[in-house]
């Protein structure tokens, strides 16, 4: 018990330093099977259900199995328009310091921010350039639901992470993804890697002009830069 309390103390102490600029929600690895999940199909049908399992192929979501009125049902990812899945208790503990800033106070016409504030992860279908030769619609987790009106940033299931620090099994610092899928306006999402970030500045921040040269933009500040850009472009 003392170890757990000590870990939590370190966790929340670091939340005001290491994660002061944490504006992207973290990728979710596990989901609650007790809280309701909300799925909207491509035909507009809305389904309230309970999560059972998810099947992936080469990192991409292929299907999700849920309980609907105590009946097991499987949906292909291609049939899903969007969905809100509740994080499991363990997953929420490991990410307790994420998204605890004014980003969650924003309103979005297209995204249910009440679900986001309740700890739900938001997934949406998006046309995506997976490689130079492969393009298709992919169901991915949106990491900036509070400020996605101009640019959407999706979790890259193939992304590696930078080094992170752990205390008692809980991540308290670091661990930023080295790549994301980024969707600008109505264009297909494309992969942006940390090492190539400066090459995409003018593409990502094109709508109302880029303030400063590409050299002034840093990967570690991507989330904050995008949030400020979205605020300025919406004014």
Image (cartoon, rainbow, N blue to C red):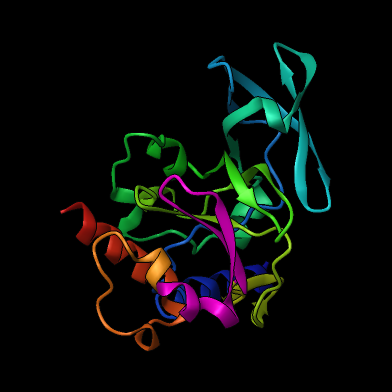
Depth order, front residue of 4/190: 190
Q: Is residue 36 visible?
A: no
Question: Residue 23 at x, y = what percent?
Answer: 42, 63
Q: Residue at x 41, y 73 (%)?
A: 201
Would residue 189 be counted in the magenta stretch?
A: yes
Is residue 57 left or right of 216 when viewed as pictured?
right
Q: Quadrant of the C terminus?
A: bottom left
- Position of residue 213 relative to residue 211, above or below, is below
- Position of residue 135 relative to residue 46, above or below, is below
Depth order, front residue of 149/174: 149
Q: Residue at x 42, y 80 (%)?
A: 17
- Judged from this view, the residue extending furthest toward the left is 235
Question: Residue 130 at x, y = what percent?
Answer: 69, 55
- Judged from this view, the residue extending furthest toward the bottom is 215
Depth order, front residue of 67/59: 59
- Position of residue 109 relative to residue 102, above or below, is above
- Position of residue 115 relative to residue 188, above or below, is above
Q: Quadrant of residue 22?
A: bottom left
Q: Which residues are magenta?
A: 177-201
Is residue 121 left or right of 226 when viewed as pictured?
right
Question: Residue 44 at x, y = what percent?
Answer: 53, 17
Question: Residue 150 at x, y = what percent?
Answer: 35, 52
Q: Residue at x 71, y 33 (%)?
A: 77
Label count reads: 0
Q: Residue at x 29, y 49 (%)?
A: 105
């Amino acid at each position: 018990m003392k170890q757990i309390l000590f870990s939590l103390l370190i966790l929340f102490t670091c939340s005001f330093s290491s994660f002061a600029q944490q504006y992207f929600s973290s990728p979710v690895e596990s989901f609650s099977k007790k809280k309701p999940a909300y799925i909207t199909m491509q035909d507009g049908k809305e389904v309230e259900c309970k999560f059972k399992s998810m099947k992936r192929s080469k990192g991409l979501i292929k299907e999700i199995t849920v309980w609907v009125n105590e009946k097991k049902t499987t949906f292909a990812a291609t049939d899903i328009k969007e969905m809100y899945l509740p994080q499991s208790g363990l997953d929420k503990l490991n990410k307790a310091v994420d998204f605890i800033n004014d980003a969650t106070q924003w309103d979005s016409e297209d995204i249910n921010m009440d679900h986001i504030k309740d700890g739900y992860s938001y997934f949406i279908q998006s046309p995506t350039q997976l490689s130079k030769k492969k393009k298709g619609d992919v169901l991915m987790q949106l990491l900036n639901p509070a400020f996605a009106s101009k640019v959407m940033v999706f979790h890259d299931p193939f992304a590696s992470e930078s080094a992170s620090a752990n205390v008692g099994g809980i991540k308290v610092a670091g661990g930023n993804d080295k790549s994301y899928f980024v969707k600008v306006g109505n264009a297909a999402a494309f992969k942006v890697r940390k090492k190539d970030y400066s090459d995409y500045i003018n593409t990502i921040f094109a709508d109302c002009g880029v303030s400063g040269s590409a050299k002034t933009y840093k990967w570690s500040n991507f989330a904050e830069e995008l949030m400020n850009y979205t605020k300025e472009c919406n004014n």
